Image (cartoon, rainbow, N blue to C red):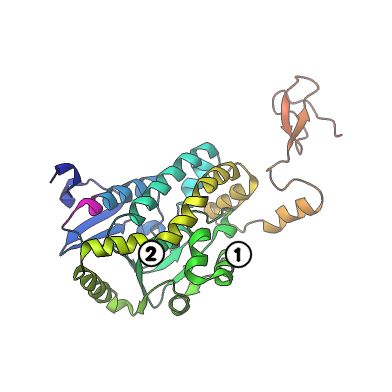
Amino acid sequence: MSPRFTGKATSEFDFREVIYEKKGWVATVTINRPHVYNSYSTLTLQELTTAFRDASWDDSVAVVVLTGAGEKAFCSGGDVKEYAEDYTKKPRDYWKWMGVFTECHDILRNIGKPTIARINGMVVGGGNEFNMACDLAIMVEDASIQQVGTMVGSVAAGGATQWLPIIVGDRRAREMLFLSEPVPAQKCLEWGLVNQVVPRAQLDEAVATMADKLVHKFPECLRYTKQQTNFWKDLAWSSTVGHAKEWLALHFASVEPYEGMNAFVEKRPKDYIGLRTKAAEGGSSEFLYGPYTHTCPSCGAKGIPEAFKFCGVCGTELKRG
């Protein structure tokens, strides 16, 4: 066998935000950022991708388990602080980030082995996209799943808008995506978001039992069964994720992510009604200080926001039209 397509010892990986373990036919990949509820940074996604690729190539791995460190969170989605600091200032960099995110999901979904989401705590936003990217899921009874895009100024087009209707049905998906309310574990089970709900003390045993059942199946048959059952998710994903990448990159230059994500970081209420009021009164709810309509009569600077009273270049007072 070519050494290029064999797995490595986990000690060979110098991960900072992921814990990677392999034992008894099972690879366990743990998002290790409990201080931020296991939200993922760009580095986390890159390390997850590396771990998933290694698990895919390692013939001593039959099952992959994805989980989060600690007991509070499985994954709370993307790091909103990173979004606010980097991508509302340079939206083009969100386009690059989305490429890292997409690669990570593509590797996980096409890993060629059954995957189990070990849901040890809250699942929020992109955390649910990782849950849905896995084949199976076991959840502790005191956890919940929540989509929060409409609360923070984003759109859950990295899997949730595509996969939730397939998994839970159209009306339930719209309820989760539009209202952004947490769905408790028992309802997640009823809706098909997870396969089992167990007491916290039984989580590891339940995951080990399910993994052992998968180990005792033919690997090639499992791989092709996975490929076939991925069809609808692959179709929805491939048809839309490129558009999502482009639109979200542009959207991060607008006021909604600026307000939503900075409010989250600053721990203050989001001004939903303020944006709606601007639009209702005929103003711009897309730009922080209105569209770029003014030209300075003194220095000739163009593209000055509509709400500005003075030129930001020379300080001249601007006449209102």
Indicate the amino acid at tag 2.
Answer: Thr
- Report whether residue 144 is seen: yes
Q: Is residue 46 left or right of residue 160?
A: left
What span is in magenta? 54-59
Q: Residue at x 60, y 67 (%)?
A: 179
Q: Is residue 126 left or right of residue 57?
A: right
- In this rendering, does residue 67 appear at all? no
Mainly helix, strand or loop, the magenta region?
helix
Q: Earlier in the sequence, mark 1 or mark 2?
A: 1
Q: On residue 215, which mark appears?
A: none
Q: Around disc 2, counting alpha carbons within 10 Å, would you say few (fewer than 14), some (14 to 19), or many (20 or more)?
A: few
Image quadrant assignment for residue 73: bottom left
Q: Quadrant of residue 197?
A: bottom left
Viewed as shown, does residue 22 lie left or right of 306? left
Q: CA distance from mark 1 to mark 2?
A: 27 Å
The residue identified by callout 2 is 229
Q: Amino acid at mark 1?
A: Phe
The quadrant in which residue 128 appears is: bottom left
Residue behind mark 1: 178
Q: Is residue 52 above or below residue 92?
A: below
- Indicate the quadrant containing the C terminus: top left, top right, bottom left or bottom right: top right
User: Along the line of sight, which residue is nearer the eye, 20 or 84?
Assistant: 20
Kindly state the secondary structure of the residue where label 1 is placed: helix
At 64% across and 46% down in the image, what residue appears? 255
Q: Where in the figure is residue 43, as x and y percent of width and height?
A: 36, 45
